Amino acid sequence: MLLEIKDGSVSFGDKVVLNHTDFFVRGTEKIAVVGRNGCGKTTLLRVLAGDLQLDTNEKNPESGLYTSRTLTIETLSQQVTEDGSLSVREYVASALPDFEEAFSPEHFAASVEFDRIYTGLGLKLEDKNKPLSAFSGGEQTKIALARLLLQQPDILLLDEPTNHLDEKTVLWLEEELRHYEKAVVMVSHDRYFLDRAADVVCELESGKITRYPGNYTHYRQERSASYARQLAAWERQQAEEKRLKDLIERFKHKPNKAAFARSRKKILDRMPRVEKPIEDRIHIHTGDIEPLTKPARWIFAGEDLEIGYGKALLKCTFRVPRGARWAVWGENGSGKTTLLRTLAGELPPVKGRLSVGNRVEIGYFDQQSAAITSELSVREWFLQHFPALTEKEVRQTLAEYLFRSNDLGRRVSDLSGGEKARLVLAKLLTERPNVLLLDEPTNHMDIPARETIESLLMSYTGTILLVSHDRYLVSRVANSLLLTEKGQEEILFYPFGYEHYTEHRLTADRARDNRRTMKEQAMIESLRAVPRGERGRLREISTESAYLEWKSERAAEDLQAAQEAWLKGLFSLSEDSEELFEKYTRACIRWDEATRE
């Protein structure tokens, strides 16, 4: 045990933040501290860092903070140093035992390690001799983090370490922390970061800390199961308590039953008390959310499509099949929102042709959807859109989106941005379109709200195209990615989910092999849609298998010729496209039979 808090409390005036709770750090554990905003996570880090003392507990002399030995404990600070004239090298070297010799030949290994960390955090080696004052606040935080990782304290304390970091740098940091040879205690709202970097989760709720082994996803599963068990136990106790009280009240005034009533009273008095669990604010939706109508097989089809604002930002030829669950992934300014606006019909193509399938009904959530204003109450606003719903149905539906009874009378205009987004999404999903185009749907939402919306989207059985910076949301909702990159007009298709993408992102080789153009993906989707009569010979295959087989097929000369002829006819809307498709299918079948032999 490196460090332990026994029966620790922290109060600020009348407000109790930590309430006779326990906490410990062992070995090289990577601990995530989670909880509602204002619950005391930062306070706990300050106690661990020694910046804040625990309250004196006269009733328990054993309470306090204990360490197994003299420890080095360092915190990532948002302010690097008051002396902005120090160069990066001087600032980092000051964390090492021999300040003057830190970058001398005798300390060459430390210098090389610093260069690795420094560039891993997205900083340029040629800037090492610049003064700290020449860097932005975000860059200074990166420099402070580089210094801490080089220093390697026994316990590294991180409060929102992914702020100011781009995706590539966050992925690098996740790997770095997983292999960090000392202990880490971290606080972050980035659930995907916690999922990859933490192996223990400590939940801080009402001043108490509950420890869960495993990453963030495992914690959520255990937390939900624990809440369900506690609630069931409390409800059983309440039922038994009511039963005993009814018996006592019924028989206490009857002479021949008075002894029985007294014995029930003793049982009631001795019954172990089960506390009602704190309500889990996350609502996990069960059952499917089915669209009202079934659309055609192809939702969208773009032919030599150029999209943008007067000038082409992206170029693509593609098909979106019914049931696709795709996330559009890329840095800001790479065209993600532009693509969704074009598909939603709000932005005309610069060039080319975009067709929408039959019976396609689109529900579109853009980044302005949460800007709704109304003098109506939440209940009135929702009922205005669904007048056929009963009062009970309105309350039940809104409760699934975390609107409690006391929220229903609030003015819509008085809601926060996250609450307005939840209300709009409640309307959108209750309308049950068969296609959802979602642009940053969980912005401004806290973690319980995000996980509630995730649950609802995972239950939705229609087609989803999603833009979001929330990696955890993307990893749970989407099974394929559309990759947009600044300066690259063509959209790339990645046929697997975000988790698969990140596993190979650092090395990049496999990710680069698996990316392909949207036009190539349109061809693969058509391959998977071979008529039923042919499936006995050419099986219906998964996306990943289709990709692997497609790569082999493209290498065969006879099949390549059939592909080119069919694609040319398909995208030119040739009358012979069906005949060309049949020839292409037969070529696929012949190749499939040959390879299986």
Image (cartoon, rainbow, N blue to C red):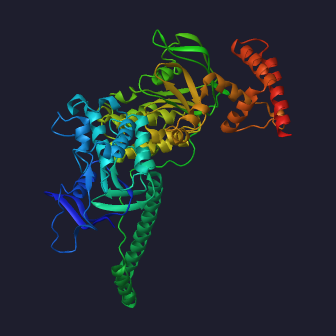
Q: Quadrant of the C terminus?
A: top right
Q: In which quarter of the image is the N terminus?
A: bottom left
Furthest-left residue in this view: 13
Q: Looking at the rendering, which quadrant does residue 416 occupy?
A: top left
On the picture, is 315 further left or further right than 18?
A: right
Instruction: Answer with the quarter of the image where residue 136 lies.
Output: top left
Note whether 80 is above or below 67 in the view shown: above
Q: Position of residue 224 (x, y in %)?
A: 45, 57
The residue depicted at 83 percent of the width and 39 percent of the height is 596
Q: Is residue 479 above or below residue 196?
A: above
Residue that sits furthest to the front in the current view: 105
Left/right placement of residue 365 relative to residue 105 reads right
Camera sees residue 517: yes
Residue 542 located left or right of residue 129: right
Q: Residue 243, position in %: x, y?
A: 42, 74
Residue 233 to residue 364: above or below: below
Q: Which residue is drawn at 35% across and 54% down?
A: 184
521 displayed left or right of 306: right
Residue 574 percent across, percent down from the top left:
75, 11
Front in this rendered view, residue 179 or 547: 179
The total of numbered circles placed on residues is: 0
Nearest to the observer: residue 198 or residue 534: 198
Q: Is residue 282 visible?
A: no
Q: Where is residue 441 in the image (x, y as percent from the top left)?
A: 43, 33
- 553 or 363, which lies in front? 553
In this view, 561 is above or below 201: above
